[in-house]
Image (cartoon, helix red, strand yellow):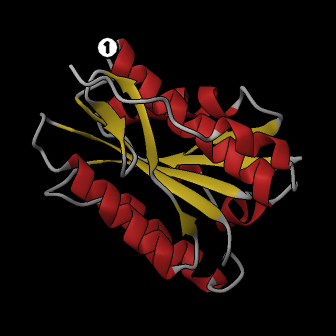
Amino acid sequence: MGRVLVLYDSATGNTEKMAKLVAEGASKFPVEVRLKKVDEATAEDVLWADGLAVGSPTYLGGMSWRLKRFFDEVVVDHWGEIDGKIACAFSSSGGWGGGNEIACQNILMMLINYGFLVFGVTDYVGKKFTLHYGAVVAGEPRTEEEKEACRRLGERLAQWVLIFKDCKKEYLKNLKPPEPDDD
């Protein structure tokens, strides 16, 4: 059975709400899911996981210093041991245009350096609402589209873990995104 870790930092609780929704989405599939705040996580949690969803508040277009420190100081000793795991990102900013997609790219770049296989999601979860670089919200996830973006990210992570780790190719048929609404 595949294993998914949802690792996050949250100063106000907004990113934590996103993390819970990501974990909820992953839990729809036959994978084991752990939800860990970065201050409580260990390198063993990352080693345990086949798939990792990393979430952070947006700070000047980047991830939080706690999350960066975790990878710089805790995970770095396991360089090469986590190569080839699957990962994605999510972020909450203070407002739309607050840099949350850039923060996701910042997280993805860090994960790529560790050898993670990262992905975005092309699905539309609402009118003109996608999660190409990961799930993003302004503040806490309030609308159904914002909540569904978080859940969909977790679902897709679980699907990729099942496909690549557990060789469950039947999950490939569910990866085609719905057609966007042209309105």
What number of labels is visible?
Answer: 1
- Identify the residue at horizontal 25%, vertical 51% (top origin): 101
On the image, which quarter does residue 82 sit in?
A: bottom right
Report x, y in % for residue 97.
10, 42
On the image, which quarter does residue 176 sit in?
A: top right
User: Is 17 in front, or is 119?
Assistant: 119
Residue under numbered circle 1: 143
Answer left or right for 16 relative to 40: left
Answer left or right for 102 relative to 18: left
Regarding mark 1 in the picture, which secondary structure is present there?
loop
- Identify the residue at horizontal 43%, vertical 30% (top origin): 179
Report x, y in % for residue 167.
87, 56
Report x, y in % for residue 105.
32, 62
Image vertical order of residue 153 relative to residue 147, above or below: below
User: Is 77 in front, or is 83?
Assistant: 83
Bin the neighbour count of mark 1 within 10 Å (Cα to Cα): few under 14, some 14-19, many 20 and up: few
